[in-house]
Amino acid sequence: MNFTTVAWDDENNTVRMLDQTQLPNAVVYEQFDDYREVAVAIKELKVRGAPAIGVSAALGVVVGIQDSLASDYGSFKSELDTVIDVLADTRPTAVNLFWALERMRRTAETNRESAVGDLKKILHREAIDILNEDRDMCRRIGLHGATLIGDGHTVLTHCNAGALATAGAGTALSVIYEASRQYSDISVFADETRPILQGARLTAWELQEAGVDVTLICDNMAAQVMKEGRIDSIVVGADRIASNGDVANKIGTYGVAVLAQAHSIPFYVAAPFSTIDMDMPDGSGIPIEERASEEITEGLGKRTAPEGVRVYNPAFDVTPANIVTAIITERGIARTPYTDTILALSLMK
Ligand code: MRU
């Protein structure tokens, strides 16, 4: 990739992010040396996508504690808790955020006997490990997922589950990148993904940058495109997967899955194992973020709905496990019955 979604800047001791709100019109990087700014960047979608949010939060913890003057674990821990709470209070749906923050909290706890200076270094290393593991996880998801794609296939995707959503090559798009490496003729249809167009602004941009054949459609064209026989499979990402295989992902995913079933097209979900919430028995308990009404009432630089109209803007939906053909993780591919196959993957390392 010739861009970096999120990284640690060793020279300046800052988190460096590509500001995705400015894509595809400008490639602008921002440096963050304040964890509160990292939290705002997550909230405002400068960085987005479940794995990238987790990595950013872990790096946000590092900037949050690096100047701590605490001299004992008790006071360091209370500063750490404040930083973690602020970063956690940003986006409720993607479980990777809480997974990464919990891992940072546990690392501190495990090393509570260390001097505060050493603890800072240990937490820094842990955040870098989370970032590097994310890269490797993307690569392995790509390898597993590519076995489900054949030469000459056209894949439809929704939202952006690509390099812009992770520290590596993505989840759903990693499958496409790997298939494109193995075969000569892979193409993609990208849903634009209303209301804020991650498919148009981000997926179309990153696939073009990577030289992958991509065609952009409005969300409401997916049914027709499937009926015309143009789509061989669908691959999307996930923000949280319940232990029974129900999948929360960007709003509109559920509709795509229903359409896939109606047209007998396989519907695949690609996600790291950290996206599976083993404490969530089914999708009904997954918190769904609701975002500002302006995302729907304003577009193209102007108001597109009457003042005062009531708006409902859930950012995610839940696709029931029974219409998910397979879940591709870095540990392998799970198929129905998901309660058993996910449990089996959870026991692997
Ligand atoms: O609101 P966003 O842009 O953070 O939503 C992103 C998605 O829904 C992605 O599909 C999901 O996080 C998977 S990213 C690998």
Image (cartoon, rainbow, N blue to C red):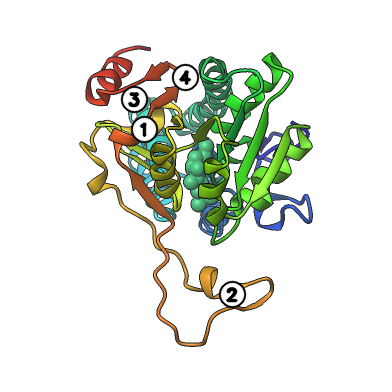
Of the two numbered discs 2 and 1 in the rendering, the one whose residue sits closer to the viewer? 1
Spatial separation of the CA atoms under disc 4 and disc 1:
17 Å
CB contact under 8 Å: marks 2 and 4: no
Of the two numbered discs 2 and 4 in the rendering, the one whose residue sits closer to the viewer? 2
Spatial separation of the CA atoms under disc 2 and disc 1:
33 Å
Spatial separation of the CA atoms under disc 3 and disc 1:
38 Å
Spatial separation of the CA atoms under disc 3 and disc 4:
26 Å
At a point 63% along the width and 29% down the height, the residue shown is 169
Of the two numbered discs 4 and 1 in the rendering, the one whose residue sits closer to the viewer? 1
Residue 46 vertical placement versus 281 (above, below): below
Residue on which disc 1 sits = 324
**Mark on residue 330?**
4
Q: Quadrant of residue 152?
A: top right
Q: Give the amino acid type for the residue marked by disc 4 in the picture.
A: Glu
**Mark on residue 298?**
2
Q: Residues within 10 Å of mark 1 (few under 14, many from 20)?
A: many
At a point 51% along the width and 28% down the height, the residue shown is 130
Query: Which badge, 2 or 1, comes first in the chain's sequence?
Result: 2
State whether residue 32 appears in this view. Answer: no
* The C terminus sits in image quarter: top left
Query: Which badge, 3 or 1, comes first in the chain's sequence?
Result: 3
Q: Is residue 272 left or right of residue 153?
A: left
Please tell me which residue lies in front, 95 or 303.
Answer: 303
Of the two numbered discs 3 and 1 in the rendering, the one whose residue sits closer to the viewer? 1
Circle 1 SS class:
loop
At a point 53% along the width and 28% down the height, the residue shown is 121
Q: Is residue 97 left or right of residue 24?
A: left
Query: Which badge, 2 or 4, comes first in the chain's sequence?
Result: 2
State whether residue 346 appears in this view. Answer: yes
